[in-house]
Amino acid sequence: MKSISTQQISDCGMHDSTLILQPQQMATIAFSEVLPPELAKASSLVFASNKNLFQQANENKVKGFILTEAVWIEVKSLITPEMSIWTVASIPQAMSLVLPLFDLKKDFIKAGIHPAAFVHPTAKVSPSASIGPYSVVEAHAEVGDETYLSGHVFVGAYCIIGARCHLGPHVSIGSDGFGFFTDKKNNHHKIPQIGRVVIEDDCELGAFTAVDRATLTETRLKKGCKTDNYCHFAHNVVIGEHGLMAASFRVAGSTQIGKNLIAGGAVDVNGHIKITDNVALLARAGVTSSITESGIYGGFPLETQRESTKTLMSLPQIKKIRKQVRQILKHLQLAEEE
């Protein structure tokens, strides 16, 4: 059970020298947890992005609130002296700053190498990094400052993990890329993958994500990339800074993607293409060729968001359209083509 003071919450409210959490009213309270309004109690801290959420929590005698500025204006008349109130422009941003104070699992993450992990003697692991149980760090690999490897993570030989990264359970960094030569008898001969993987600073990779070793040079995820679970990055792929990729994002070999990519779930990207900066891909999009203009795209074949939406809206009408076409052909006494 946590006991977080109002002062601790106020102290965490800075980001890039800007005050994010604006204290509006402070009472001497200690908070034990953060809960949604319907489950909250007097010792809870509640985030409320609208008046209804505030009122629901208020009925539960909640004393601590982080509110949007608009909600604060709406509910001022309901505030009592024993409440502590902070206002923010963005609830998600406030959550990113405040929730670490209440994260119980962080109490059990310590710098160092778990006794059940294997780290090769030639590997370089920062003293401030944390290597979880049954993880493997192979020869000459590097793990940076304050990076956390969950249990069962694999980091292959000569691969580099930057600072402040978070690798979820069963992440694989530097397994061999998928490269084979097929001879005339349909025998498949392995092409050795002799490159490496580089994961730059501040990246987070969800559980079961795989980043394959390059054939000759590097597979690289640049600074600030975040992936959900079950993502796959094939050999020689480069992902630009601050990519954000939902579950089951998959990209084939040698594709280069610019910065600020946003990808929905189950997006597939073809190999040997380029995607420019500031592209968003809707869930289940299929990218078969290069994207040269920033924007939002979806569907398969890939279209702009506007055209993709039109296509999706048209699909339920196909049976009706086919029936109408048959009626027209019959009226014109034309045979329907096989």
Image (cartoon, rainbow, N blue to C red):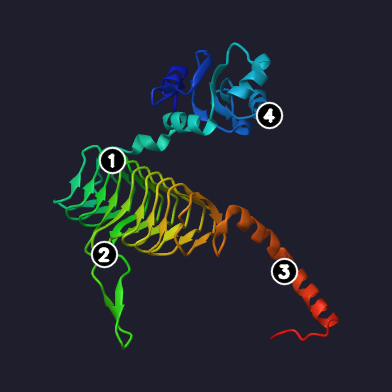
Query: Residue 140: horizontal and vertical position, in percent?
Result: 17, 53
Instruction: Give above or below for 52 relative to 75.
Output: below
Query: Residue 141: horizontal and vertical position, in percent?
Result: 21, 52
Give residue 163's mark: 1
Instruction: Sort mark 1 into few (<14), some (14-19) or many (20+) by Cα contacts within 10 Å.
Output: many
The structure residue drawn at horizontal position 21% and vertical position 64%, both measured from the top left corner, is 194
Of tags 3 and 1, the one toward the viewer is 3
In front: 311, or 16?
Answer: 311
Q: First in sequence: mark 3 or mark 1?
A: 1
Q: First in sequence: mark 1 or mark 4?
A: 4
Can you tell which quarter of the image residue 42 is in? top right
How far is mark 4 from mark 3, CA to CA?
A: 43 Å
Q: Amino acid at mark 4?
A: Asn
Give residue 215's mark: 2
Instruction: Give above or below for 273 relative to 38.
Output: below
In the image: residue 21, left or right of residue 143: right
Of tags 1 and 2, the one toward the viewer is 2
Can you tell which quarter of the image residue 303 is in? bottom right
Q: Secondary structure at mark 3?
A: helix
Of tags 1 and 4, the one toward the viewer is 1
Instruction: Give above or below for 131 relative to 288.
Output: above
Q: Secondary structure at mark 1?
A: loop
Are the two marked residues, 3 and 2, in contact with CB atoms closer than 8 angstroms? no
Q: First in sequence: mark 2 or mark 4?
A: 4
Of tags 2 and 4, the one toward the viewer is 2
Query: Residue 82: horizontal and vertical position, in percent?
Result: 58, 13
Residue projecting furthest to the right: 331
Give residue 52's mark: 4
How far is mark 1 from mark 4, CA to CA?
A: 41 Å
Looking at the figure, which quarter contains the N terminus? Answer: top left
Q: Secondary structure at mark 2?
A: loop
